[in-house]
Amino acid sequence: MSAAAPRPGETLLSVDGISLAFGGVKALTDVSFDVRKGEIRAIIGPNGAGKSSMLNCINGFYQPQQGRITYRGVERRQMRPHEAAEQGIARTFQNIALFRGMSTLDNIMTGRLLRMKVPFFWQVWRHGPAMREEIEHRRFVEGIIEFLEIEHIRKTPVGRLPYGLQKRVELGRALAMEPELLLLDEPMAGMNLEEKEDMCRFILDVVRQYGTTIALIEHDMGVVMDLSDRVVVLDYGRKIADGTPAEVKADRRVIDAYLGVGH
Amino acid sequence: MFYREAGQFKTSYEADMAVFPIRQDRIGLAIILVAAVALPPFLDSFVVGTVLVPFLVFSLAATGLNLLTGYTGLLSLGTGAFMGVGAYACYKLTTIFPGVNILVWILASGFFSAAIGVVFGLPSLRIKGFYLAVATLAAQFFLEWCFVRIPWLFNYNLSGAIEAPSRSVFGIPIVGASATPLARYYAILAIVVALTWIASNIVHGRVGRAWMAVRDMDIAAELMGIRLLRAKLLAFAVSSFYCGVAGAAMMFLWYGGGEAKDAFSINLSFTILFMIIIGGLGSLLGAFLGAALLHLVPIFLKFGLPELGVPIGGATAEHLTHILVGALIVFFLIVEPHGLARLWATTKQKLRAWPFPY
Ligand SMILES: Nc1ncnc2c1ncn2[C@@H]1O[C@H](COP(=O)(O)OP(=O)(O)O)[C@@H](O)[C@H]1O
Ligand SMILES: [Mg+2]
């Protein structure tokens, strides 16, 4: 781990020359970009461009065949997902990956697991230290539940919730980890306009209140333009553009990729 | 109408996190506990010995398997063998150190099963579902082989059986020929109540949440910082501990000794598995409901029906039991995978709203 945490505006994460292939399928080819502390960084591109694969490399689900990932100034070759979690990287999934048999509250409480350290011996009695720890984290989680306005579904098993609320609970679970870097894979996919607006508000508030750095994948160009500070565009596993939303929007290759010209 | 939480407001997180947040549930539990202590002296000792004691032993084993299969999502067919490890460990301990309280040894033998469970749980990091079940099946057969082939385990008895020596607690014999069913019942009741309370504490806290996360989606669990191997091995350890204690209790408080290799066979593994499927995967109440149903149905068919004047032979009753249990398993797997416990929860939900449908 690096000695000093990066200050706002400094580079928190940089990926350098990442290539990833599944058998013959090249998911990513020589992709490089960086994420600065405190910004919202969008990753866009057509379906199958390799966006989700990129996030999977960052938090250790996939091991790229080539390239380097530098996080908080430390370069790493291989990392397991639980190590990424310990380093302060949280994420949500394109296809919701909640714990379906558990309530909203318990799902979000799992985000605190890394910070709950009272040994098994005390868990057995559920009094004393174990109970104090449980209450302390419950209090924190209630703060998130209030922030996301999901008090009414606190005790509901998440499998029974509508899609939009599940996405919100998944965001809550990631927030409960108090991450330094939050990776959001299509947080607004399949939502209606109102739900999208809510989600945008939550994302902006997260950055403002907790100073979290966010890398997000999104399809809705309007949302991307509104939310993000900088955008990287992938197409067929390659980076084709990188810059502010306005720059990217005007880029010839981006327009072609989105309109399907030239392929 | 009577089952309402109206007016019961939680004023602290501690109250809200209680295992039974609704007062009626707490009262119900208290009544059951009082009845479990006060009623058995008035029951026929045959009933205590053949209905209540086995029911508690099965409940304990089913609780153990439920921690592994229901809460952590790891299917095991080695329950019978893990129970056997407990029984043999207890036998060795109490013959080597006869002076120590037998209840201490019954509980201590759980640690031996826990250790064996961890060893056979190691493959669970790499394999799951069907393949893990097969690996635990291998454990079952390997351990059964040990029970027969290592005479040191049964103190070189020519019959190969475990003999239950006489053991007393506070001057009251609870193991051996002179132990009454009632004394054995209170011994197993104390163990089951204590261990169920502990299981409830575990599953409602950090550890239980980690287990359920592994069960519901292991990749997301890893992302929350859970170390899968550690969580799974802990589940194997705790689960096997419970099974081991149940096995020791089965041998010493129920059977009173006997041919262990038949007792701890694959059939026992399946019986316990069926109990949690019917009772409810991932529910402590379910372990008890399943144990009650699967243990009581055969007894009812064999003794109850003739009492009621229905002429039924022993063999027919046995066949009927198999058919009924099979049908129940198919029913619950298809219609209500969460078993009797979920049916009970749904009923309570309805009661809460009654007489209004919503
Ligand atoms: N686990 C995997 N196994 C095989 N191929 C994969 C896997 N994950 C992704 N891919 C392939 O990599 C490419 C990029 O996929 P993905 O990263 O999901 O794209 P996006 O998120 O941009 O839609 C696709 O061709 C996909 O089929
Ligand atoms: Mg994707």
Image (cartoon, coloured by chain):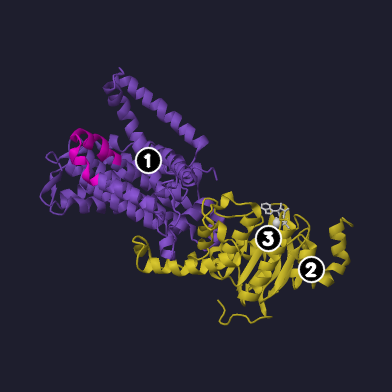
Q: Distance between the residues labelled 1 and 3?
A: 42 Å
Q: In the rendering, at what x and y percent does residue B251 appear?
A: 23, 41
At mark 1, the secondary structure is: helix
At label 2, counting other C-alpha atoms closer than 10 Å, the crowd grade (few under 14, some 14-19, many 20 or more) is: some
Q: Residue at label 1?
A: B289
Quadrant of residue A63 within the rendered picture: bottom right
Mark 3 Cβ and ligand 2 under 8 Å apart: no
- The chain coloured purple in the image: B
Quadrant of residue A235 within the rendered picture: bottom right
Q: In the rendering, at what x and y percent does residue B102 appear?
A: 18, 50
Give whichever of A191, B22 is nearer the camera: B22
Give whichever of A161, A225 is nearer the camera: A161
Q: Nearer the viewer, mark 2 or mark 1?
A: 1
What residue is at 84 percent from the left and 72 percent from the top?
A: A247
User: Label 3: chain?
Assistant: A
* In the image, residue B187 lies in the stretch drawn in magenta: no
User: Label 1: chain?
Assistant: B
Residue numbers of the magenta segment: B36-55
Q: In the rendering, at what x and y percent does residue A72 appear?
A: 61, 76
Contact check, label 2 and label 3, Cβ < 8 Å: no
Q: Residue at label 2?
A: A225
Q: Residue at label 3?
A: A187
